[in-house]
Amino acid sequence: MGLRSRGLLLLSLGICYLQLFTLANVALNSNVRVKRQSGTDSLLTVEWEGIQTGDHADSEVKGFLVEYRPERSGEWQLHPGIIPYKGPNHQYRVQIPKLPTGISYLVRIKVIGENNEVLVETPEIRAHNEIVSIKCENDDLTAPRYPQVTEVAQYSLAIKWDAPDCGSVGDYQVELTGVSAPFDIHRQTVTQPHVSVTNLLPGTFYSVKVRAADRSRNVGPWNSEVLEAKTKGDALPISNNIQLLYRTDSELRVSWQPFTDPRLQHYEVTAVEVDDDSRRVERRRVDPALNSFALTGLRPNTKYTIGVIAFVDHEPKQVYQIEAYTTSGGIESWEEKPQVVDQGKQQFAVHWKLPTTSITVSKFILEYRLPNETTWRTSEQKGVADESGDYSVALSQMNAPYYTVRIVAIDDQNKVVARTEELTVGEAAETSCIGSAGVPTNIRSADVDGQSIKLEWDVPRCDETHTPIDGYEYIVYEASQSAPVDGASYVGAPHVIIKGLKQNVDYTFKVRSRSVNGHSQWSKDVIIETAVAGSVRSGELGEPNQLLRVKRQAKHLIKDSLNIFKLRIVLSPPCSFLVWTPLTQHSQIISKFKLMYKEVSSSKWIKLIGGMDHFRCPPGIADPEDYCYQLKGLFFGVHYISSISYKLTNGEELPSSNPLHFTLVQLDGSAAPSNERVTLTQPRIEQSASRSVAYWSVVGDRAAVTEYQVDIRSTDERSWRAVEPSVQNEQSQTHYRLPLGQLNVASTYLVRVRALDSSRATVATSPSASFSVLCQVPSAPENVRLERVSEQLVRAAWDSSQESGDCQSYFFITGQQNGQAINQRVPGSDRSVDIAGSSQGDWRVQVRGVNTAGSGTPSRDAIFASSAQQSRRSKRSVCDPRTDFWCKGEFSNSPLREPDSGEGAVSV
C-alpha cells in the first residue's frame, strides 16, 4: 500500500489538572485529556491517568465509567462497558466513535467501587479544535479502530470494529478473556470486521482484543482502546473443591468434587498458560462419570490456570478453578510392573512394592484405562505407610474385556517421582494389540552404514477388534546411558531409518505397537553396533547376542524362494529404489526388463519396459550385477505391489518373480535419535449434519513445517489414505481444521495428522483419533406439494437429502383432509405417497423425516383446494348456460363447448 494521508479535524481539550477530594479521599491523578477527530463523522478520545487511593484499597476500586453528552443536551450517554482499574499511574484511553459533526461535547468520568457505587465523579470537560493528519509511512498494519459491543446475551457477545488506518487486511484475530475467569479464553479468526463469540460464561466480564493480519500472515498490534463487556445473567459460583493430584514437566492431573445433578452432561476442563507472551489454551471435554482429568502436552516449568465447568442441559452451572506449575525435570525409572489378581465377579486387586528412588515417595495413585478410551482414569490414593513395602488397591465392576493399569508414585509436592510400566490385563489381554500379542517381534537390520541403520520388524498378529494398530513408537539411545523414561518417536510402517548415529558406538533400540487408545509393551532391547563396515548385533527374541554381518543391501537376507530376482527396496534418502538381481547365467544375454507396480487397491498396473542401460543403478546404490529403478510420484503410507521379469536375446521370456509388497512410509520417517520439536494434538472430530470436521493444534518450533496432511482409514482398512487438500502451515496460527468429506454412516474411522516439510517428509505425527460416523437428525423436507391423481386419490411429494442407509430413515406425512386426520409413514427412500380420500375439499399436510438419531423439523404446510371447493356457489333455480358453467349439473373436466365450434375451449 502506497503512502497515503487523510486530513482530520481534531477537537481537543486544553490540559486540565484536577485534584479532587471526597469523603472517601479518592482522587483522579494527573491530567484528563479529551480530543475529537472529525471527518464525515467524529471520534471522541478520552485519556487520563490512574487514581491515588486514600481510605480505599486498590481491591475496592473496580474501574471507570465514561459518560458524554452534547453541550446543548442535558441527557448523558454512557460509553459501553466498565474500563477495568489497572492500578495507580496507569494510562487509560477510550474512544467514542461516530458522533455527529458540528456539535460540542462534554465528558465526565466516574470511578466505580467493587459494588458498582460511584466513588468519584469528575467535573464536565469540554473539547477544542485543532487539525491533525494520519500518514501511512509503509504497508505495516495499524490497530483496528473503535471496537464496540453491539449485542449482549447470556452466553454470547457480538462485537464490531472499523478497519485499521494503514495496511492491507487479510483477516482479523479476536480474543476474549474472562476477567474473573482467566482460564476462559476464546479465540476466533474472521474476515469481516465483526464477530459473534459464543459459549461464554453468564454474568462474566470479558476483555476484548482485536488485531489484523495481512495475507502474508504478518500481524498488526492489538487495539489500543480497552474494551470490556459483561454477559447477561448471574455469574456462576466458583468452587474451590478442586485439587492438584500430581504434576510432571508435561502433565497436570486435577480432581474435583462431583457436581450433583442427574442431568449433568459433561465437564469442560481448560488450562491457560499464565504468560503474557504466549497464552496457549488447552480445552478438553470430560465424561460426567469422571471427576479427575490429566492435561498432557504442557510446557515444562510453566504456570497454568485451570478451570473446570460443569454443564447441565447444555448450560454451564458450576465453575472450579485452580493454579498449578509443571515441573522442570523428568521422572525416575520404575521397571517393576504391578501384579493384578483376579478375585472373581469382576473384582481385581492390584499389588506393588515401594520403589527405590532418590526422592521420598509420599503417596501412590492407581491409574487404569479402558478399551476405546485414550485417557487414564484414577482410583483411590494410597499413602505411604511406615515400615511397609507392600501396597494394594481393589478395582471393582471391571466388566471390560481388558484394561491397562499403572501405578504413579508422588512426593509431598505433588511431583511424580516414578511411574510403573503399563500392564494390560483381562480375559482378552493376551490377544489384544495393546497386550503381549501386540509386541513387535523379529527385529532385524536390513540396511546399515556408518551413521544410519534401517530396522525392520514383523507386524504383530493380534486382535484388532478394539485396538487396531495405527503405527509404532520406538526409542533409540546409546547403550552406555540409562533408558529415557519418555520421548518415544512415531513411525507408521514396520520399519524405520535411524540417522545421525556415531560410528563405533553401541545403541539400544526398542519398539512397541501404538493404537488409538494405547500401546503394547516394549519389545526386548536390540543392541546395534555402528561401524564403517556396518555391523549389527541382532536382538531377535531368543538370540540376544549373536553377531551378524550384513551388507548395505542385505539381499542375502531375502528368504522368499520365489523371489528369484531378489526384488527389494533400497533407501538412499531422499530417494527410494526398486532393486533386483538377474540370474547369474543370464547376466550377459538380457534383451529387456519388464517392471510393473501398482497400488494394491488399484486394478491398473504401471508397466516399464527398457533395456539394461535404462535400469543401470546410480553409483553407491547397489552392486555391479544389480539393476535399479528410482520410485517417483508415489504416496507415503500407501500399500504397493511390484514384480520384475525379463526377456533374453534369444526371445525367451522368464516369468515374473514373486510380487514384492511395500509401503513408502519411512522416507518420511527418517529420524535422528532426538525428540521431535513439533507436537500435534490428537485430532478432535466434530459432526454436524453430513459433515465430519477434524480439528487439531500444533505446539513447538514449526520452522521446518510447510503443511499438514490429514490421513484417514476405516477400521476395516490397513492402509491410510490422504484427505485432500493438505492444510498450509501458518506461523501465527496454532489451531487448524479440515472437513473429511463424505464418509459411510455407521462406520468407524481412524484419523491422524502429519506435519510435512518442504520435501513432504514427515516431521511429526499426531496420535490417531477414532470416531464413528453417526446418523444425524434429518433436516426439514423441501418443496412439499399435493397433486390430484384421481377423484379418490391425492399424491403428496417432497424433496429431501435424507438417505435411508444404515440410519433406518423414514418419513411421516401428517395433516388434515376436510377435517379428517392424515397419518402416513413411508420408507426413507421414497419421495412421494398416494393418499386415499376425496380429491375435493381442503387438504393440508406436512412431511417430517425421522431416523435413529431422532425426529427432524417438519416441513412447511402444503395446502391443496380442489376446483370444486374453490368454485362453490349457490345454484339458482334458473340458469343461463351462456354465463353459468354449472348449468349442466356437477362440475366436469370436459369442455363446455366443442373444440370445433369456433369458440375457445374452457376447462376447469
Image: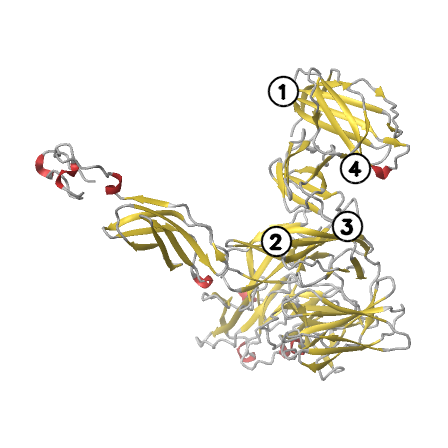
Residue 90 rendering spot, x and y as whole percentages: 84, 33
Q: What number is the disc on residue 273?
A: 3
Going by the picture, which residue comes out furthest to the left?
A: 901
**Side of 359 relative to 588 (left or right):** right
Q: Residues within 10 Å of mark 1 (few under 14, many from 20)?
A: few
**Side of 753 relative to 876 (left or right):** right
For marks 2 and 4, the one nearer the N-term is 4
The residue type indicated by label 2 comes to: Asp
Q: Residues within 10 Å of mark 3 (few under 14, many from 20)?
A: many
The residue type indicated by label 3 comes to: Glu
Q: Residues within 10 Å of mark 2 (few under 14, many from 20)?
A: few
The residue type indicated by label 4 comes to: Asn
**Quadrant location of the C terminus?**
top left
For marks 3 and 2, the one nearer the N-term is 3
Give the distance between the C-alpha atoms of the residues marked 1 and 3, in whole angstroms: 44 Å
Residue under circle 4?
A: 115
Q: Determine the secondary structure under disc 4.
A: loop
Residue under circle 2?
A: 313
Foreground pick, 675 / 679: 679
Q: Quadrant of residue 451?
A: bottom right
Q: Determine the secondary structure under disc 1.
A: loop
Give the distance between the C-alpha atoms of the residues marked 4 and 3, in whole angstroms: 30 Å
Give the distance between the C-alpha atoms of the residues marked 1 and 4, in whole angstroms: 40 Å
Foreground pick, 785 / 620: 785
The residue type indicated by label 1 comes to: Thr
Q: Are marks 2 and 4 in contact (CB under 8 Å)?
A: no
